[in-house]
Image: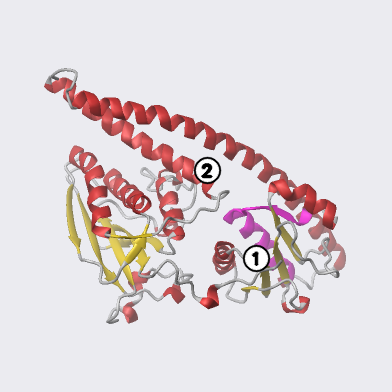
Amino acid sequence: MNVGLISEDRELLKLCREVLAGISDNTWSVSPVSEDSDGQIADLWLWDYVPGLVLPRTLSTQSSRNLFLVQRQDLDEFRARTGATDTHVLLKPPSRATLTAFLGAAAAQVDQASLGSTLRADRDEIFQCLIQANLRLQEYDQDRTTFLARAVHDFRAPLTALSGYCGLLLAEPVGPLTENQREVLSRMLKSTKRLSRMASAMFQLSVGRHVKRHPELQRGDISECLEQALHEITPFADDKSIEITTDIAPAVHPLFFEPGQIEQVLINILDNACKFAPRGGSIELRGYPYFWDRRKTDSSIPLAAERRFGNATEPTAYRIDIRDSGTAIPAGHLEHIFEEYTTYSGGRDRSGGGLGLAIVRMIVNQHEGLVWAENSEFGPMFSVVLPFYHPDAVPVQERIPRTA
């Protein structure tokens, strides 16, 4: 089955490919195409609608072969222009779960084309009702997300002030402190910093899917980010007597990234490691140049398992491994703990409700990198790969043709 995507959004193309890889048996493919392509080349069309998009005159907006991704503020204009019903509309940006549900249903329609006409009509009618209900739920979800983003934004200001006052008192410009007072203030400062990180993560997750953000790439020293992250996390490790060891090799080629964002990635993973490493346990942090075959990005096999790449002589990326001595992550959850609000049952849930690790994946994806988790002989390991590349170097084959 071939899915035609009419869009300039490379992230949407990547998401579609990941979703199809997860729900099909490799018989599906998705390709970016222009609006004037022959309609026979695709079994299903995904239209990334923008005002002014050129639509073919023969396009049937009521056909189950067409799905339109529309911004909420453009819904009225889209309806007036096309006359399409809401049963063929998903709000932008589509969530992974919503896109998975729709494409999965489309696959079922193709695979079950031999069903009786009456049964197929009943099934299609139920499916269209579900999509229409889903559109309403997406509208409610966007309202909730907007409210949450505003509330969290207002929440961050007093936390920042509280952290500043704790630091001011610890510096003792207003008078000396007793040991007990210093201990209390130190704990308050640690707690406010943790709350500030959580608030920032919640804010970024709330607006991340609705605001297209491109990192402000600049040439940087990855070792400085690692040192800053360790500085932030050391007090929490000391509280549990966790030993942190590092082995950081220099990058052999320039790395372009946004320092604050990559520091946040490392802090979140290290904070996760501190949380689940046992008291008196250990955390190992290793950074080194690495060969990354970016053609394998969509593979579900961790890069660490790609032994055939082990003897490559020319590194194409920089890899950071953070391993802790905590208990193993259930195998069935290794690929899901980076998803938003994902949890799994058990005494200790590594996903933490999906805040810290979800923000990690979002930032790494924005940097065109890769992050994954796996269980090693010595404990769970989280790995981040950032490519060596110049920010202006965009491969020609990855460009998506304009549709208007």
**Residue reaching furthest to the top:** 175
Q: Give residue 316's position: percent from left, percent from top.
A: 34, 74
What amino acid type is highlighted by mark number 2?
Answer: Ser
Q: CA distance from mark 1 to mark 2?
A: 24 Å
Magenta part of the protein: which range?
87-110
Residue under the image location 33 percent in, 79 percent down: 309
SS assignment for the magenta stretch, majority: helix
Depth check: give the residue in front, 324 or 397.
397
Colour logic = secondary structure
Q: Position of residue 29 (x, y in %)?
A: 62, 74
Q: Earlier in the sequence, mark 1 or mark 2?
A: 1
Viewer-closest of 134 and 294: 294
Q: Which mark is residue 7?
A: 1
Q: What amino acid is at disc 1?
A: Ser
What residue does disc 2 label?
206
> Residue at coordinates 73% horizontally, 71% vertically from top-left?
35
User: Dividing the picture into quarters, in which one does residue 24 lie?
Assistant: bottom right
Quadrant housing the C terminus: bottom right
Q: Is residue 65 left or right of residue 27?
A: right
Splitting the image into 4 quarters, where does residue 14 fall? bottom right
Q: Is residue 259 left or right of residue 66?
A: left
Q: Is residue 324 visible?
A: no
Question: Callout 2: 10 Å neighbours few (<14), some, many (20+)?
Answer: many
Query: At numbered mark 2, what does the secondary structure look like: helix, strand or loop?
Result: helix
| Residue 286 % position (x, y) | 23, 61
> In which quadrant of the rendered image does the N terminus lie?
bottom right
